[in-house]
Amino acid sequence: MDAFASQAKQAGSLWLAGFREACSLHRVLIFCFRSKMLSIRTGQCFLLNGFIFLGSLFTLKSAVIPTLLWILPDQCEKLGPQHLCNHKEALALYSFLRFILIQIFYIFWFYPLYVFSFILSTLWYNDIAKYAFDVLRKQGPSKAQTPNRKDSPDSQSLRQVGRPSGFERVFLGIGEQVYSILLLNIFFIEVFAAGFIPYIGKAINFLLLSLIYAYYCFEYKWNFSEVSLNERLEFFESNWAFFAGFGSPCVLPILFFSTLVSYGIMAILYPLFVLTAAGTQVEQVIYSLTSSWGGGGPRKLRIFYAADKISMLVLQLFPEVQKGH
């Protein structure tokens, strides 16, 4: 029991450390001040996802729907002539027309805007991470480096040992990308399914979403630092409590808003957390905490175990890709 309490306390400390690092939004101002292109891309994300997407949703809720209710009322006393109240078909027809018009609004505006926003934001997020990494490299190699998964400050060269070169390296990179995309998509299905578990489904869903969003935030930094997929997964699962805390602020909107509103808010917040992740010396933060613990912190949590097994089964159908992984 004492061992469990100790593990829980350590996990809580790492969770708070991750949450605190994610909320270090002053780093965003520093990055934007030092890179004009980064400021432009960040502003474009705010304009697209905040002003256009959320603004359109606000217009629908506050103007379009009330106007339709005024033209096609849903209450008898608003129909006008009293004889219409005697015909329930009128209210049913008005309700059907409102539904059709609102669905047309969604089909021809919101859903295309959602897809357009998702694709364009994904490209911009990569640009934001690239510009942030350029800023870090100008400050010095130590700022841009990501130490190895042993949680101690090591040099960049340690990660390059055993890495192939030339065409073999390109092939390995393609294999890792295919495996990574497959792994994370399967994991997202698990996250979605977890939400249907009775009583504890929402809590598990929130935890897993926090983890996956934290992974995405740090993945840009790991890509630019050329950290291998196996190393980043090992490091992530070994320090899951820190990353759960880091991803929590980004996922908070799902607890308070509808799906579309949550997407808009999270799309605005996400580039901010990508920047805070870029400026976080995560290994040093974790090492500063775990170095004083005899056991080295909470036990490793095999977050991607099921997704990994399913991914490997799928990749067995493509031997060349599996060989690249």
Image (cartoon, rainbow, N blue to C red):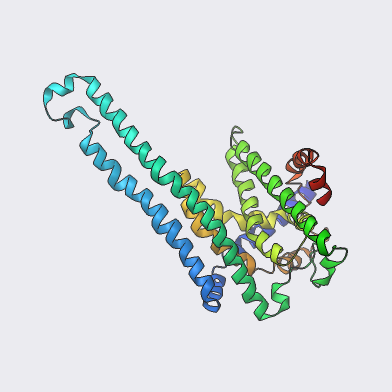
Residue sitting at the far front = 167
Near-viewer residue (236 or 216): 216
> Can the viewer see residue 154 in this picture?
no
Q: Position of residue 269 (x, y in %)?
A: 51, 59
Which image quarter: residue 142? bottom right
Q: Where 127 sits versus 116, above or below?
A: below
Judged left or right of residue 285, residue 275 is left
Which residue is the extreme one toward the bottom? 139
Residue 195, percent across and down?
A: 59, 37
Observer-nearest residue: 176 or 4? 176
| Residue visible at 45% across and 62% down in the picture | 46
Residue 258 sits in quarter: top left
Work out whether residue 77 or residue 6 is closer to the camera in this orientation and state it.
77
Taking the view exactly as shown, the residue that stands out farthest to the right is: 162
Drawn side of residue 71 relative to residue 97, left or right: left
The front one of 267 and 116 is: 116
Q: Which percent across, then down, holds residue 170?
A: 78, 59
* Residue name at image x 73 percent, y 55 percent: 236
Q: Is residue 201 above or below residue 81?
A: below
